[in-house]
Amino acid sequence: MNRTTLSLIAGATALAAVTGFAAVSAPDPGSAEQRTGAAATLPVERTGLLCPRPSTSDLAETTYTSFAPVTEGADDKGTAVLRAAAQQSAPDDDGTSEDGKDGENGAADEKDEGDEKGEKGAAKDDTAGKPVLQLQEPGKPVTAEADGADAPALVGTADGRFASGWTAQQTTEVAAGTGRGLQGVACSAADTQFWFPGASTDDSRTDYIHLTNPDDSAAVVDIELYGKDGELETTVGEGITVKPRSAEPVLLSTLTAEKQTDVTVHVVVRSGRVGAAVQALDDETGGDWLPASADPSGRLVLPGIPKDATAVRLVAFTPGDADVDLKVRLASPSGLITPAGNETLHVKGGMTAAFDLGDLTRGEAGSLVLTAPDGSVPVVAAVRVLRGEGGKQESAFIPAARPVETRATALDNTAEGTTLSVTAPEGDAEIKVTASAGTKGGTPQTKTYSIKSGTTQDIEAPVPAGLKGSYALTVETRAGGPVYASRTLASTEGGVPFFTVQPLPDDRGMVAVPDASENLSVLQR
């Protein structure tokens, strides 16, 4: 094997490592890209997703949805399957497992028989490993339903024609009780570090950090909590073991004796990798999922705050020792504006800061743009949004998001109750939005939109002709930008405005593979 071939394989391997499960293959030696010496942009050929356990409520009704867009240049074969993960424990609100034994952080005893046998030792229920959703063709979403607290966490992989842009979502409706409302979360790739500003250990909240391990070996995880005065003392937050191909919900209030309204959670994986998401359940204002914030940065965008939000609470945290005065702007339909009284917000280094911004959007679409001076101090952030009044309020979370660099997809959309919000904070942009076929029928539709610089637009997204069931909305950046987007699902139950918001990060379905003649030593360091 010659040196250039070895270099190409090393580069592709490095790219695969960066994108979690993702893998690509080298371009055909006879391709145009290879002959001209340019990098070839190719569809990812293998990827993975993890979905947390949907709910601990017996009243929960969950819909899982899976979808892969049609991708030019993708293989003509492949599979995309989501399977039930082994459920280690099902903690009650007091943090104990179902069998009544106090395990570590509300988990089952770590010395279960068969641990040394890897995956077999982790599979403690009959549903573990069973297929839940399998795609049949690109461009058409599929769904599955599960009721009650037994709905499982999911572990899945896609390859071939389904890998590029593969997306999965779970949407849960809880009719009553703590966390009642609409809860939605996009399934995510495994990683080794996560930030969650906006969690809580207060008595009014029941917040879980859900950890899902996709691999055949155990993962070891540390959970750090930061409150208004700095890091909270935790009793059992270090060295948490997540067994192979299993899911572990950890009740945050069992990790510390300190009760604080606003907490930043930092998940660090010592060994292996996991998927992570916080489920925040409130006694009075319902609940939703809090996805991880974008990586710490001196510039953050929190897209798609509902125009009828009655209260917006911003939670921010800077991991370093330096304080920062964040410049706050709202990208409205008419441009960037500075909220009166909240022009700058002071965040102390290593301490979680929270700010009530009131009815920030005032009946118009809006996205928050946060900027540190010169971008010198990295920050993570999220907002908690309330809709409704008095005893009929519902809550959702919007973390700082990554831009839609090429393409992103939101699932489980309906003809009514779906709002697609798009912002271009730095420059004019053009996007293409495709409504897929419906899960039970319908013809795809496509529209293009222009987004002016500094604005947020709630666009009238296309709907499949003859729609039956739910459908996917795929956003593609055609020019300009950067573009950030989110999708809101909403309904009204008993006078309560149920809703959930999911940012649309880039699906990372395409990757540039350098030409074999290029020097890839930088990728091998």
Image (cartoon, rainbow, N blue to C red):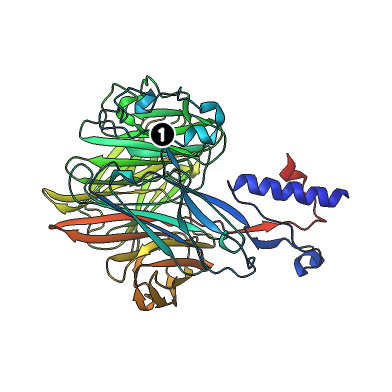
Q: Residues within 10 Å of mark 1 (few under 14, many from 20)?
A: many
Q: Is residue 131 left or right of residue 259?
A: right
Q: In the displayed structure, would residue 280 be above or below residue 340?
A: above
Asked where in the image residue 43 lies, by quadrant, the reply is: bottom right
Report the label total.
1
Q: In the displayed structure, would residue 513 be above or below residue 275?
A: below
Q: Position of residue 361 (x, y in %)?
A: 26, 57
Q: Residue at x 29, y 38 (%)?
A: 354
Q: Position of residue 400 (x, y in %)?
A: 41, 48
The answer to whether residue 303 of the structure is visible from this angle is: no
Residue in front for this viewpoint, 477 or 348: 477
The answer to whether residue 291 of the structure is visible from this angle is: yes
Q: Which residue is mark 1?
A: 88
Asked where in the image residue 238 lies, by quadrant, the reply is: top left
Residue in front for this viewpoint, 92 or 496: 92
Task: Name the residue furthest right.
Answer: 2
Q: Quadrant of the C terminus?
A: top right
Q: Residue at x 21, y 53 (%)?
A: 359
Q: Position of residue 470 (x, y in %)?
A: 35, 67
Q: Residue at x 17, y 47 (%)?
A: 176
Task: Tell me the kind of residue under disc 1.
Answer: Gln
Residue in front for this viewpoint, 348 or 354: 354
Residue in front for this viewpoint, 280 or 169: 169
Task: Name the residue furthest left.
Answer: 390
Q: Is residue 406 left or right of residue 346?
A: right
Q: In the displayed structure, would residue 97 be above or below residue 442?
A: above
- The local secondary structure at tag 1 comes to loop
Q: Is residue 164 left or right of residue 452?
A: right
Q: Position of residue 473 (x, y in %)?
A: 42, 67
Q: In the displayed structure, would residue 329 be above or below residue 267?
A: below
Q: Is residue 157 left or right of residue 473?
A: right
